[in-house]
Image (tube, rainbow, N blue to C red):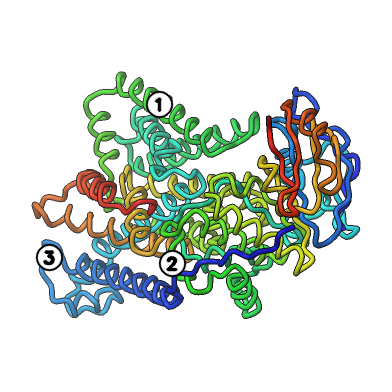
Amino acid sequence: MLRVKDLKFHYQGGQQVLKEINFKLEDGKFLSVLGNNGAGKSTMLKCFNRIIDPEAGSISLDGEEICRMPMREAAKRMAFVAQTIPNTQMTVHDMVMLGRKPYMQWGFTENDHRIVHEAMERLGLTEMRGRFLNELSGGERQKVMLARALAQKPKLLLLDEPTSSLDLKNQYQVLQTVRDICHETGIAAIMVIHDLNLALRFCDRFLLMRDGAVFRYGDAHVIDREAIWQIYGVQGETADVRGQKIVMVD
Amino acid sequence: MNSDRLPLENNGCGGEYHKNKVKSIWILVLLGLVLAAAVLLSLWAGSYDTPVTELLRGIVNQANDPKINVVVQNVRLPRICTAVIAGAGLGVVGCVLQSILDNPLASASTLGVSQGASFGAAFAIIGLNAGAQNGGGLWISLAAFAGSMGVAAVILGLSRFSQITPESIVLAGVAISSMFTGATTLLQYFADEVELTTLTFWTFGNLGSAGWGQIRFMLLVVLLSSVYSIFHRWDFNALLAGTETAASLGIHVRRMILINMVLCCLTASAIVSHVGLINFIGLVAPHIVRRLVGNNHVYLIPGTILAGASLLLLGDLLARTVVSPVILPTGAVTSFLGAPLFLYLLFKRRKGVC
């Protein structure tokens, strides 16, 4: 269980970016963080990821305070998938192996190799493990980064707009994989995303942010005409298409 | 929610991983053999013609002809050791800087180390008249070392005032280089002809001037930075995935950049202060190895150490033999040959390799 309590942050000399963020996320749930640019979504993710230290408040995972943990220990509990996908001449296997870095002493153990193999198998990468990243498509590379995150054996997965540079098919594949991972392994995931319909299609929880504060938090019901207007400043409708809630902007 | 699954795509080349791994290891072995061959060739080449077996005996002071013992022990072996250690050190410095600064053009001169060393040497030669004194070479080396370490101190000092980023380090390096180059030119303005000549010869780069004591010091520093880099090879790999991803893997990115920068400055200073300015080794060696084994630092760092050592040794061999008995300045030869090699790599490189 993830608990975020009274989380606050402001950049030096700047205005308050995060204002007393409070929410809880159960294991195995996939949360999307939604809001306009500048609402504080990515800053919140940076606090989770230990890139910046929150000014006040706490982030606890299964009762352990993340912010007071050594970075290496935090990396054993949380994994991060960035928006930019590396395009380097490194094999898929080696990139996934990077996920075992927080556990590494001098070299990798048999257990590390087994976990990496499982992560590649989970993402369907076993057959391409010898290929270089710069030979793969954007979708395949993002799956490699997901496998790398899984190899960290995290309790919490953080994703910063993971589909922003992918085509429609790969967007669906990547998010479907994340959702399946959450439901099957009990890992909780927090994803910053702009596409409301993708969020509605794959996520279980929704955190709507406005001006650094939580506007609404809950299941798909929190997204309605009023929320769309308050968060994005546009008129919109929600509709039900074959059992799937979708958002249409006027 | 709809749970229809889209098929995950595979491209069927699992055996390639093992093939790539074996290929990378073989390339390291091959680079080791090239270095060994370059060492033997350098030992053999020279104006004093001797059989190879005698030369090998000369290494352990057991040659039948005592002159060969003297030539090997006092001339050729120190020169070879200097080239191997300096080349390996400049290679590892280039590789680490290119990685931490995320800049394929990074090398010791990017941070201004070479320019700092030049200023230090110029100060010793012109300001302290070290070129005309007994033991002046030591003073020149010490001043060059102090000058280049001064650069590290300035960069570290600047980083205390603001957030240190790879871009800011490169820009600070450009500014500091410019400042030291200007200061060196000002010193040269007040120098006489002898001092100017001494300084010019120092900047040419000379592998023949280091004694065993200086070689031992260089070896210690190069070993320290090489072992540190090899130990942290996966930290450099993590940086390839981006600084945020590296942080999420438990790496203190800022601390890592600072430690490596200090080590690179120390290593480059130790080398440049003893052998003068040797350009392009630190820039080209990592690019050559990257083309052969890819970006995985598990292979890239040892490969760059071997390639840097081989390149400088071969460059020195060429400098000693091309117009023998005249010995050309090694720094000039490495620059002259390194630039076309770099251009070749630049235009032949595959997309996304570097």
Picture quadrant where residue A135 is located: bottom left
Can residue A211 be seen at all in this image of the molecule?
Answer: no
Q: Which residue is mark 3?
A: B48
Closer to us: A230 or B78:
A230
Q: Is residue B301 above or below residue A207?
A: below
Q: Is residue B61 above or below residue B192?
A: below
Q: Residue at x 86, y 38 (%)?
A: A216
Q: Secondary structure at mark 2?
A: loop
| Left or right for B205, reference B264 | left
* Kind of residue indicated by mark 1: Ser
Do callouts 1 and 3 point to residues on the same chain? yes
Q: Residues within 10 Å of mark 2 (few under 14, many from 20)?
A: many
Residue B90 at x, y percent in the picture:
39, 52
Q: Nearer the viewer, mark 3 or mark 2?
A: 2
* Kind of residue indicated by mark 3: Tyr
Q: Residue at x 29, y 62 (%)?
A: B310
